Image (cartoon, rainbow, N blue to C red):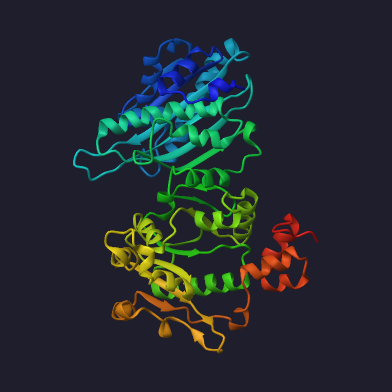
Amino acid sequence: MSVSNRDRQFLGVKQKALAINLDKRTYGSFAEIGAGQEVAANFFKAGAASHTIAKTMSAYDMTFSDAIYGAEESGRYVVESRLIKMLAKEYSLLEIRLKEKRGASTLFFAYANTLTTISFDKTREGQGWMGVRFQLTPNSEPNEAVMHFRLLDNDANLQQAAVGILGVNLIYGCMYRHENPEDIVLTLMEELSSDRVEVDMLRITGPDFMELDNRLISLMLVKNKLTKAALFGPKGDVLQPTDFFYKKNILAYRGRFRPFTLVNQDMYENGVRQFKEELGDDQSNLVTVAELTLFNLYAAGGGEIDLKDFIDRVDIVCSLGYTVLISDYQGYYRLASYLSKFTRNKIGIILGILNMEEIFNAEFYKKLPGGILESFSSLFAENMKLFVYPIRKENGKFYNCLNFEVAENLRYLYMHFMESDKMEDIKRFNAENFNITSDLVFKKISNNESDWESMVPPEVASTIKEKKMFGYHG
């Protein structure tokens, strides 16, 4: 479905709902569980809703909900599996009851959400799932957009209003701004702001989106400030951070990965080995992530993120079976604070000794009210530990935590963290690889020098050659 340039201009939620209502091709159902029927209500208030709404319903009672959609194994209702069941049920009813009568001229859709708003005593935050199953051509197989969101207002009524806006934006974006997926992302936050709503996962699939890489959608969420971090698995499947990290032991490794070298592999594998030793018998509850920051992506792109460069790096990391975290957390203390939201179990961060110079540089924390000490409260929290990879200096000696050069006024604080077991050197490492850097490998690939293959894992070399990454031309 195409739209005019006028329709691409900013529209308020009432205008969007009315535009859909007046489009005689769109027709669908609404099923909302949780706060109320805020999304459907916006269509009723806009007018001409009879042109759009086949049915609207809420199944608040758990017994009623289970009778309609089936019980969840987890016993939870604000979960993705419940949303998928709702979309499947409501869309199938549209086809069963209306396809023969009006399928040739109608674009069917089913919208659903399952959510919870902030509790009265403010101990439970608002969050939920919403999605839409929709056609862009009559009699076609439907597409599907599914997302997870967090509600940040400190009042349940404000959160309900935010859900109403977000739902209309999702439906409108999927139906009228689908030609550029980033337009769908940008549409979500119209009339909203990042201090009201966070969208930390969005997945769009279907026959009209076969060429869409949802890893780019994850990047767009972070780039456009809908969330600070997004997550996807080795096969490119988009993951919801809370579900992935919740009550886990977490080990994160930040890098540029342009490309992933033998040094990166050595850091990661020996860091994981050492973290597992730290965990002892509790290793089954461990998840690991390779993290890319927007800062490093922008640095490579010269002011704009190079999407091919991003996908190349991600393909490399995913080819090794790693889960990837994209974040807007430049400082390590911000990454630590983010991961701490999900678990009270142990959290480890793998980093190089040169990154420690940034961590202990007070200049980086001038904007924090508490300065460098405020950053340390997150980075060296009770369940946090740094695993530090050494380098070899020009004099041939190893530079590590034991001989780290710290400012005199921070020396005793550094000693305290060392003695408190908040950081330790990665003890096993391959010193023969210390001369390998990502920049060196990248330059050799671009210059068609053959010895670069010996500087990266075999899987990485194969992927680079197969997909002609980083300027490789055989």
Report whether 161 appears left or right of 183: left
Image quadrant in which the C terminus is located: bottom right
**Quarter holding residue 298:** bottom right
Q: Is residue 8 visible?
A: yes
Task: Name the foreground residue: 366 vs 414.
Answer: 366
- Write the residue at 63% across / 20% down: 139
Q: What residue occupies the far left of the structure in this picture?
A: 121
**Quarter holding residue 413:** bottom left
- Write the residue at 58% across / 70% down: 265
- Write the residue at 43% across / 26% down: 168
Q: What residue occupies the far right of the structure in this picture?
A: 474
Task: Name the foreground residue: 246 vs 232.
Answer: 232
- Residue 436 % position (x, y): 63, 75
Report whether 192 appears left or right of 409: right
Image quadrant in which the N terminus is located: top right
Report whether 156 appears left or right of 356: left
- How many marks overall? 0
- Residue 314 % position (x, y): 60, 55
Task: Name the foreground residue: 91 vs 275.
Answer: 275
Task: Name the foreground residue: 354 vs 22.
Answer: 354
**Quarter holding residue 441:** bottom right
Q: Is residue 420 visible?
A: no
- Residue 97 % position (x, y): 52, 15
Above or below, 319 against 188 in this view is: below
Above or below, 210 against 139 in this view is: below
Above or below, 156 against 201 in this view is: above
- Residue 287 % position (x, y): 46, 61
